[in-house]
Amino acid sequence: MMECTVSWTGANATSGSRSGMTFLAETGSGHTLVMDGAPDADKPENGGANLAPRPMETVLAGAGGCTAYDVVLILKRGRHDVRSCSVKLTSERAQLDPKVFTKIHMHFLVSGRGLSASAVERAIAMSHEKYCSATIMLSKSAEITTSFELLEF
């Protein structure tokens, strides 16, 4: 079982107001994550102060972290000499509430010695088809596409 407690901090750090939209997440593994909303010019009391990532940005980052972790682990387990892996995620969201992700593109940049394009392609596919809980879950509402670049280290 995984646990997380998310608490509204109540105070806007820049103004001291109790109307801010900053939240602190405390994970079951003992880590903390701050989230905030975008400022709202029309209703400042409903907006954030742009002090931290938005909650949906953290969802997107979590999906990127999950799949990058898998890709590196799959390549390492295959005894490939992977040296770096990054993934840039771009997304589109629905216009109306709930504003779920409708499209997510993940572009991987992987480097190593003697890595083959087929090994990287296979690792990405395995992550998205079998291992990455985050991308598999998000694929229920979003079209997820991938691409990659392979650099020799």
Image (cartoon, rainbow, N blue to C red):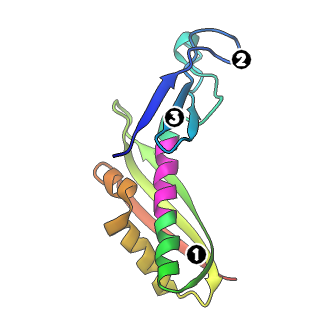
From the image, which quarter does the C terminus lie in? Answer: bottom right
**Label whose residue precedes the other's in the sequence (2 or 3):** 2
Residue at the disc numbered 1: 149
- Residue 80 percent coordinates (x, y): 55, 85
The residue mark sitting in front, 2 or 3, is 3
The residue mark sitting in front, 1 or 3, is 3
The residue mark sitting in front, 2 or 1, is 2
**Residue occupying image coordinates x 39% and y 53%:** 134
Mark 1 → mark 3, Cα distance in angstroms? 35 Å
Residue at the disc numbered 3: 26
- Residue 149 percent coordinates (x, y): 58, 75
Q: Decide: few, some or many residues near mark 1? Use Cα within 10 Å; few <14, some 14-19, many ≥20.
A: few
Query: 99 and 4: which one is in front?
Result: 4
**Residue occupying image coordinates x 51% and y 64%:** 68
- Residue 22 percent coordinates (x, y): 57, 24
Q: Amino acid at mark 2?
A: Thr
Q: Is residue 64 magenta?
A: yes
Q: Which residues are magenta?
A: 58-68
Q: For the residue labelled by badge 3, is the local secondary structure a helix, a strand or a loop?
A: strand
